[in-house]
Every structure is written in structure tokens, then in C-alpha cells.
Amino acid sequence: INAEYGSVTNLNKFEEKNYLRMVKIAFIHPDLGIGGAERLIVDMALGLQSKGHTIVIYTSHHDTSHCFSETKDGSIQVCALFDWLPRKMFWTIFCIVYHHKNDIFSQFYVRMF
């Protein structure tokens, strides 16, 4: 095995193949703009991609005029889902559900039992 992966001894061919197997990885992030959390997601994606893994970032909003260059130039595959919805709509729904969470839970609990 390559020294990059460390010294692994006593592996048969099947174990060696699984040890070096590359996987498909999906990151899910709510808004892929410019910020610390977004930089972390992009850096992790680039690091894993450099190891040979297939990376896709799923997000609800990706503005190409306000994003990191790696997501704009195609270095990382970005799939923006529900980008056509107003961004504040999710926050409004979240606030309503969070505010009424006890009522919603109690109604669900009463109906189940």
C-alpha cells in the first residue's frame, strides 16, 4: 500500500481494495455564501476530492456573485435546490414551528395514544 495511507501489513487483496475504496460524499448546507462555515465546507470538500472521492454540495441557495471561487468555477459540484423560493420563507416557517412546538408535539402525542 502507498506510504500516503500509512503502513498497513497483512492485508489480502480484497481487504486492500476496500481499504483504498473511494466513496461518494454529499454535503448539505442551507446557504452557500461567503462565511466561516461555508469556507469549512468548501475546504473539507476540496480535501476529500483531492483524495479521489466524489463530492456534491447540496444547498438551498447559491448566489454565484457572492460565493467562493471553488464553487463558482466548477472545482466542486454544487446543486442548489429550492433556489427559487424566497430565503426568508424558511426562517419564517422555522420560527412558527419552533414557537408552537409544544402545541404541535402535544397534539401529535394525543392523537397517537
Image (cartoon, rainbow, N blue to C red):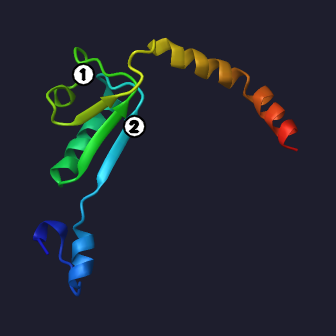
Quarter of the picture containing the C terminus is top right
Q: CA–CA distance between discs 1 and 2?
A: 16 Å
* Amino acid type assigned to the residue bearing label 1 in the image: Cys
Q: Position of residue 45 (x, y in %)?
A: 25, 43
Q: Residue at x 40, y 37 (%)?
A: 28
Element under disc 2: strand
Q: Residue at x 14, y 28 (%)?
A: 73
Badge 1: few (under 14), some or many (20 or more) residues near its Cα, within 10 Å? some
The residue carrying mark 2 is 28
Q: Position of residue 41 (x, y in %)?
A: 31, 37
Q: Residue at x 23, y 84 (%)?
A: 11
Q: Position of residue 90 (x, y in %)?
A: 52, 19
Q: Position of residue 70 (x, y in %)?
A: 17, 31
43 above or below 68?
A: below
The residue carrying mark 1 is 67
* Amino acid type assigned to the residue bearing label 2 in the image: Ile
Q: Residue at x 20, y 82 (%)?
A: 13
85 above or below 79?
A: above
